[in-house]
Amino acid sequence: KELILQKAREICTCNHQTITTFFCQLFPVLDWLPRYNVKTQLLGDVISGLLVGIVAIPQSISYSLLANQEPIYGIYTNFFSNIIYVAMATSRHNFMGSFGVLCLMVGQSVNRHLQLAGYSDGSAGSWLVGNATSSTNVTGTCDRSCYAITVALSLSFLVGLYQILLGVLQLGFVAVYLSEPLLSGFVTGSSLTIITSQMKYLLGLKIPRHEGVGSFILTWVDLFRYIQNTNICDLVTSLVALAIIVPVKEINGRYKEKMKAPFPVELLVVIVATVVSYCFNFEVRYKSAVCGHIPTGFRKPTLPDITLFSSLAVDALPIAVIGFAMTVSLAEIFGKKHGYAVRANQEMIAIGMCNLIPSFFYCFASSAALTKTLLKESTGTQTQVSGLVTSLVLLLVLLWIAPLFYSLQTSILGVVTIVNLRGGLKKFHDIPHMWQLSKLDTMVWWTTMLSSTLITTEIGLLVGVCFALLCFIFRTQRPRATLLGKVSNTEIYEDQSTYKQLSSVANIKIFRFESCLYYANKDYFKTVLYQKTGVNPVLLAAEHQKVEAQANADTGNCKSFLGTRFDCLKQTKKKAVKSPADACPPSPDMHTLILDCGAMQFIDTVGLSVLKEIHHDYKEIGIQVLLANCNPSIRHRLREG
């Protein structure tokens, strides 16, 4: 009671210092902005912000296609979320905006709700309300694009709410259950799914967007089924764009240390493709799908649709966890590299605000964007001021430049999306090295990647987490167990099966169990202990009891025989004396068993019962059991138990 009251007084104390500290922790910009050095930091931030903004323009539009939204909403998302992240982030290098994996998950949820609401399935070109004939929904009050963004912003609201609650409750540790192999496999599997979903735009095919289990395979089946309907103009344009973008990006990556800034090939291709499409009228002449009219300015804020919350609650959870995990992972990587601290719970609140507040301004879920964050760090950013510069670039697009992309083909947007997923596909090259380091981690990678690709992204993530936890349990359930020997002329004891020329101590066995002792591995502990020491006290005790019973039976027979035939008295006595000795089981070759508990971090009540049982069983056959290298927590448990 006193402890709770003391903590409550400390938390609820209100004065000038606590208020200042609270706001500086909630808005880190109040801490670092007054100390901003214009002479040494501004130039790097401006250059980095401009370059990231140039790259963000085509990616914002292309990722809108992936999220099943109009291009303007992708620009909104990058603009608003980046400004909020500048004020609330502890990371100096993360770029907050649309991320391919999250856009895929948002698009899947949106498409599922569009089908449930009675809208016709989208096809290449029909995802924009302003350019294609939109279907009328069951209520007749909102067209297809309107309902799509309503679902997306309601989903973004829930994602932000989840992340803020996790941050306020100090539950940032949940991200530790998403290991690096798991996240890598999930990103690779999602990349394959994204590439598959974009292939219809590259080929100019109008095929339905499949959702649920097996959508990856069904999409490829449809691609080959309707391959004869390929739009030659879209195909040629896509191949030319790929032939230009991929080599240039490879050159950018290979010579990034020598180049002051990467060449903005994506923006150049988008501009040239838009001009060519406009001049040759690809939309009318070759029936190519184009972006169409992109409005300028900002729309009036709106409220999320509360009626959708019940159906979106489950979809929002994996998006919230993945978005947080990617953001914190990138923040910690660059924080460690550049020597500053990152607060995981504050990052959780920051990314939550980046999803919650923009949801009122027609934005979908966002997180730290991998490619733009890497670009931001490599171009010399110093602080999040570069994020403000990027937002200014996007603001120019929102106010004046956006309508110029009317004739941009959707196939070019698909190419931009696919090219930016090269990093996820390159993970296949790391598999042999990963297999040499850890076979279990490689199995986690393959399981997560295949389940994310062949089932669904959400189920794939759940399968990956469950499989990773099972692998961890398997490691602790069947850990390494060895007998130790002594190094000559030292007090060092090591594994006899690993090191040579170790001497065993006479009549003493030293057993090491390299894991915690708890309910899941108690049976394995006893089994491997009996196997390594060669002494099973239960069987030996049973043999002793059997011999004693046999001896008692022989003695009883001798007494009966003595009453009838006195002449056989001496012979019977000899038999009675010799029988127990002759039938006695072999005695164990040790008198002491030492359990090395140095690798045991904890022992639960079941493990304590096992130690009691072992101590009792070995004592029955005359062997004492000793415990060595017990840490303080284990000694406390032993005393209490």
Image (cartoon, rainbow, N blue to C red):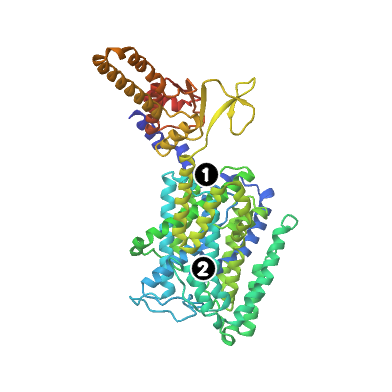
Measured from the top left, where is residue 566 in percent x and y? 27, 12
Q: Nearer the viewer, residue 255 or 89?
A: 255
Looking at the rendered structure, the number of numbered marks drawn on it comes to 2
Residue type marked 1: Arg
Q: Decide if residue 375 is on the left or right side of residue 228.
A: right
Q: Residue at x 65, y 80 (%)?
A: 276
Q: Find numbered disc 1 in the image and state the secondary structure of the residue it sits on.
A: loop
Above/below status of 236 relative to 331: below
**Label whose residue precedes the other's in the sequence (2 or 1):** 2
Which residue is found at the position 48% from the left and 64% from the top? 454
Residue 241's spot in the image, x, y percent? 65, 73
The quarter of the displayed image where residue 372 is located: bottom right
Q: Is residue 504 left or right of residue 626?
A: right
Circles 2 and 1: CB atoms closer than 8 Å: no
Quadrant showing the N terminus:
top left
Specify whether residue 244 is in view.
yes
Q: Residue at x 57, y 77 (%)?
A: 203
Q: Position of residue 58 (x, y in %)?
A: 59, 68
Q: Which residue is mark 2?
A: 66
Give the residue pinned by disc 1.
343
Q: Quadrant of residue 251?
A: bottom right
Q: Residue furthest right?
A: 258
Q: Nearer the viewer, residue 564 or 166?
A: 564
Dot 2 lies on which element? helix
